[in-house]
């Protein structure tokens, strides 16, 4: 018997993402969650809207939106291990490298390491040209409890 945990299938990850994408929060914020190739968590804003803007009093994406992208992308990385377990972001540290401008935004998060109850992950946000505009590191608490809805935290 192996001690290596069994990873979820791409189908399980896609179902988790689709349930999340139907949530009122992501719908309202214009964000989409995915797990390409089951190796990272990606959150996109396919179309930056006026309500996303306001950083530095300019047309840059507001820090509130950037923080939300990081919290969601880092907070969903545990699904790469087990999408049925509850989790919560415990710590989030962000650094901004350049104003985030353009018509689309992409956050990518990956697991750095994990134990029984804690996961460490890192993320970056890219603009429409693929330039890194911000980076983050996070600590996520893993629970042994399943989500209240059964499969996903995305409860409407």
Image: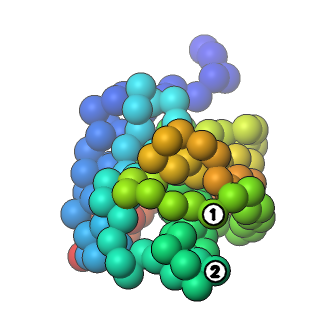
Q: Residue furthest top?
A: 1
Q: Earlier in the sequence, mark 1 or mark 2?
A: 2
Q: Position of residue 84 (x, y in %)?
A: 42, 50
User: Which residue corresponds to the image point at 28% horizontal and 76% vertical from the top-left?
Assistant: 28
Q: Position of residue 138 (x, y in %)?
A: 72, 57
Q: How many marks?
A: 2
Vertically, is 37 above or below 86? above
User: Which residue corresponds to the image point at 63% horizontal and 16% vertical from the top-left?
Assistant: 2
Q: Position of residue 75 (x, y in %)?
A: 56, 59
Quarter assignment of residue 148: bottom left
User: Which residue corresponds to the image point at 69% horizontal and 58% vertical from the top-left?
Assistant: 98
Q: Residue furthest front?
A: 58
What secondary structure is found at the residue carrying circle 2? loop
Q: Left or right: where does residue 54 sit relative to residue 121? A: left
Query: Of 31 and 130, which appears nearest the observer?
Result: 130
In which quadrant of the rendered image does the N terminus lie? top right
Residue 75 is at least partly visible in this image: no
- Mark 1 neighbour density, 10 Å: few (under 14) some (14–19) many (20 or more): some
Q: Mark 1 and 2 residues: CB-CB less than 8 Å, in contact? A: yes
Q: Position of residue 55 (x, y in %)?
A: 58, 78
Residue bearing mark 1? 99
Residue bearing mark 2? 56
Vertically, is 114 above or below 87? above
What secondary structure is found at the residue carrying circle 1? loop
User: Which residue corresponds to the image point at 77% horizontal and 61% vertical from the top-left?
Assistant: 95
Query: Of 143 and 136, which appears nearest the observer?
Result: 136
Vertically, is 54 above or below 145? below
């Amino acid at each position: 018997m192996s001690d290596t945990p069994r990873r979820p299938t791409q189908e399980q990850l896609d179902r988790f993402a689709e349930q999340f994408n139907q949530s009122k929060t992501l719908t309202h914020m214009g964000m989409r969650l995915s797990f390409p190739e089951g190796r990272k968590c990606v959150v996109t804003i396919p179309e930056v809207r006026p309500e996303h803007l306001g950083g530095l009093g300019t047309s840059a994406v507001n820090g509130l939106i950037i923080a939300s992208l990081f919290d969601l992308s880092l907070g969903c990385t545990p699904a790469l291990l087990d999408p049925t377990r509850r989790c919560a972001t415990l710590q989030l540290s962000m650094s901004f490298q350049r104003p985030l401008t353009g018509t689309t935004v992409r956050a990518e998060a990956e697991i750095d390491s994990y134990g029984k109850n804690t996961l460490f992950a890192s993320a970056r946000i890219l603009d429409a040209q693929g330039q890194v505009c911000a980076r983050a590191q996070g600590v996520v608490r893993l629970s042994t409890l399943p989500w209240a809805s059964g499969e996903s935290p995305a409860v409407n």
